[in-house]
Amino acid sequence: MRTASALAFTLLLLGTSLAGCAGLGGGDDGKDSDQSLEVPLWEVGDWWLYTFSTPDYSDDTARLVVASDTEEDGSAYMLAISSETEARRHAVLNHNPFLGRITKDNLSAFENGIAQPVLTFPLAKGDSWSFSLFSNDWSATILDISGNLAIISAQSSDGASLDYVYDEAVGFFSSFIWTDADGSENLRMMLAAGGEAHTGEVFFVRGGDLYSNVWDNSGPDAEFRDTFLVSDHPSSGEWTEMIYFLDASCGSGASTISLTLRDHTSISALARVWGPGAEELGTLGTIPYPSEEYTLTLTFTGNTNLRLKIAGGITESWTL
């Protein structure tokens, strides 16, 4: 990426310096708090390595890569991931809003097909604006400009907050934290490294939620049956695959779980059985041939827990 200052990398949260990887550095380029930061110019192959932490899923790391600079008739970039598995994970967990198209004017992410200005350039202390993200409306203010950093806080009417730091030296966020009104963190996104000229294949999976549920059973034996329809992506046509993510655990004794997912022809698309003491966490998989209707059948005995998410996916790839 090309910015007004030399390329350097820092790990900073709200202006506090953190220890980084060897070879990463940071510094103040002499900017005063009354100066502004200009929008960076990304180039194909620029990349950022982030860690993502959420309360419901184990931490994961993803290398975000600029795959294209010709999206939206040349007005947007495409931000992809260097791993197809990670692209699928992000499509089904849906915790990274900064994948896919990113506008060139403000590095705006798209939600429900609309560009959302999480940043508005040039960035200057005291600037305020509004946007939508995570299905919520936010009012943002730049609290300070400190060297290469813009320190920003956004509030929603329900008391939730977004606290994030844009770093001009890296051309993107050094941190991005989403916190509920009760203080619980929904997402912590932290920069670990970055660079230019990534080579190899990169991926973006356009996802859409199809099914999600959680079951906790500590009483008598139980059976659950549900059906759901799989329709096309609203603008991009048929899914190329379905992606599932599951966590399952059984207590001791006679605790068991059985899971069967069948399509409209009664062919089993997914089947699992867990016995006493079994645990399977963070499993990611695909179902290759979506159909119009699926039937899910579950049985539980003893102390059990199951979480299941299913999303449709349309995979795009680029070779850099």
Image: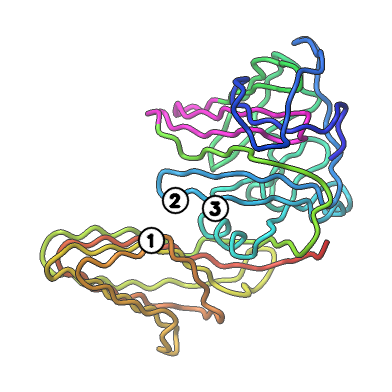
Identify the residue shown where x is 32% and y is 75%. Answer: 259
Task: Report if the CB atoms under discs 2 and 1 are less than 8 Å apart.
Answer: yes
Q: Quadrant of the C terminus?
A: bottom right
Q: Nearer the viewer, residue 223 or 64?
A: 64
Q: Which residue is mark 2?
A: 58
Q: Give whichever of discs 1 and 3 has the lower sequence position.
A: 3
User: Relative to 93, does residue 2 appear above or below in the rendering?
Assistant: above
Q: Percent from the top left, x then y, of residue 174? A: 66, 33
Q: Percent from the top left, x then y, of residue 232? A: 60, 70
Q: Which residue is mark 1?
A: 281
- State which mark lies toward you, 1 or 3: 1
- State which mark lies toward you, 3 or 2: 2
* Mark 3 nearby-residue class (10 Å; few <14, some 14–19, many ≥20): some
Using the numbered discs, state the Cα–Cα distance from disc 3 to disc 2 in whole angstroms: 14 Å
Q: Which mark is residue 94?
A: 3
Q: Give whichever of discs 3 and 2 has the lower sequence position.
A: 2
Amino acid of disc 3: Asn
User: Relative to 22, does residue 276 appear above or below in the rendering?
Assistant: below
User: Relative to 9, does residue 313 appear above or below in the rendering?
Assistant: below
